[in-house]
Image (spheres, coloured by chain):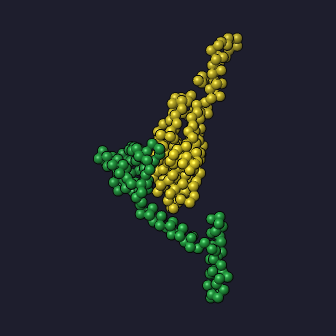
């Protein structure tokens, strides 16, 4: 399997993969990185022009540019961290004794689930 | 240097220095068979997005030994994880002189995501190799996404070794 080796340090491998996939389509097998640099694994059918374009894109690659999926994951993670800060104290069913009976049942269930999750997270 | 032992001794046949030296050299060869190992202590971990088997690191995870012919034990100890929240499979194989030992889907699969790292360690017998130089490369592939092999930055220190055993 042909490879294209390019010396450069930090890359955002998911973003670089997505970028090169728009260029090469199914001819891109994947990207690897070790201390020697970036290795682009390609199918046999790649032209010399494509090879040059791959090298140009790898060299021009900005590792700080996120993919849509990475951005979504980052936002989801930030939202979760924010929610954790907003709800540091466990839910206490005693705070809802004047709620409707069905609500009190749900609160007890949610409090139980919260305890289970805290236990799983070692909190 | 291993010499095939003489097994056709005759009654009253004289044992000469060459015979005894061959025995001594064989004992030395048995004590120190061909061996190579790399212990990773890299400044950055290894990553891939490859969905077909590729070398994990041609520069670091490629070992060459000169064998007397026979079997070689290949061992890898390491861990992998994914940066993706989706669960992916990371498959491993060993390429011996460019030919994968297991073929098809490889030797083993580690299932990971960003919350759970997985053990990716294995031993593998490579049998009936010819005498001479042989190169062993660790290879991997993914079902999707991207994966990371801890290679020293964490710091975990994977080991890849090959040893002639017969």
User: Residue A84 placed where, x, y %?
Assistant: 57, 70
Residue A73 location (% of width, % of height): 48, 64
Q: Residue at x 43, y 45 (%)?
A: A37
Q: Is residue B53 above or below residue A112?
A: above
- Residue B37, given in percent of the width and then of the height, sits at 57, 37
Q: Quadrant of the C terminus of chain A?
A: bottom right
> Relative to the observer, which residue lies in front, A93 or B134?
A93
Residue A26 seen: no
Q: Position of residue A122 (x, y in %)?
A: 65, 64
Identify which residue, A13 or B132, lies in the foreground: A13
Give the residue drawn at x 61%, y 84%: A103
Please state which of residues B95 and B114 is positioned toward the viewer in this rendering.
B114
Quadrant including the N terminus of chain A: top left
Dividing the picture into quadrants, the one containing residue B23 is top right
**Judging from the image, what is the letter of the chain drawn in yellow?**
B
Q: Quadrant of residue B31?
A: top right
Chain A, colour shown: green
Total marks placed: 0
> Residue placed farthest to the right in the image?
B11
A31 w.r.t. A74: above or below = above
Residue drawn 56% across the image and 73% down it: A86
Left or right placement of residue B124 versus residue B143 in this view: right
Tell me, yes or no, if residue A36 can be seen here: yes
Q: Is residue B47 left or right of residue B155?
A: left
The structure residue drawn at horizontal position 55% and vertical position 57%, both measured from the top left corner, is B112
Of all residues, the one furthest to the left in this rendering is: A49
């Amino acid at each position: 399997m042909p490879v294209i080796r390019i010396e450069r340090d930090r890359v955002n491998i998911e973003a670089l993969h997505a970028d090169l996939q728009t260029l090469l389509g199914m001819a891109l097998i994947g990207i690897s990185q070790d201390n020697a640099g970036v290795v682009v694994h390609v199918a046999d059918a790649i032209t010399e022009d494509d090879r040059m374009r791959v090298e140009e894109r790898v060299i021009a690659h900005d590792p700080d540019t996120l993919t849509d999926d990475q951005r979504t994951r980052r936002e989801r993670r930030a939202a979760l961290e924010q929610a954790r800060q907003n709800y540091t104290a466990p839910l206490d069913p005693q705070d809802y004794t004047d709620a409707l009976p069905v609500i009190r049942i749900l609160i007890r269930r949610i409090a139980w689930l919260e305890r289970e999750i805290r236990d799983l997270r070692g909190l | 240097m291993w010499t095939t032992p003489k097994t056709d001794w005759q009654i009253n046949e004289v044992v000469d220095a060459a015979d005894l030296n061959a025995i001594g050299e064989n004992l030395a060869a048995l004590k120190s068979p061909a061996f190579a190992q790399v212990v990773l202590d890299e400044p950055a971990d290894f990553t891939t997005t490859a969905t077909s088997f590729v070398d994990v690191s041609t520069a670091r995870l490629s070992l060459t030994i000169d064998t007397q012919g026979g079997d070689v034990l290949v061992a890898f100890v390491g861990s992998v994880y994914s940066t993706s929240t989706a669960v992916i499979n990371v498959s491993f194989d060993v390429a011996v002189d460019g030919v994968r030992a297991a073929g098809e889907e490889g030797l083993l699969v580690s299932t990971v995501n960003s919350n759970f790292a997985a053990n990716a360690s294995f031993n593998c017998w490579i049998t009936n190799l010819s005498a001479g130089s042989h190169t062993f490369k660790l290879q991997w592939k993914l079902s999707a996404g991207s994966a990371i092999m801890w290679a020293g930055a964490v710091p975990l220190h994977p080991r890849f070794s090959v040893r002639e055993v017969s």
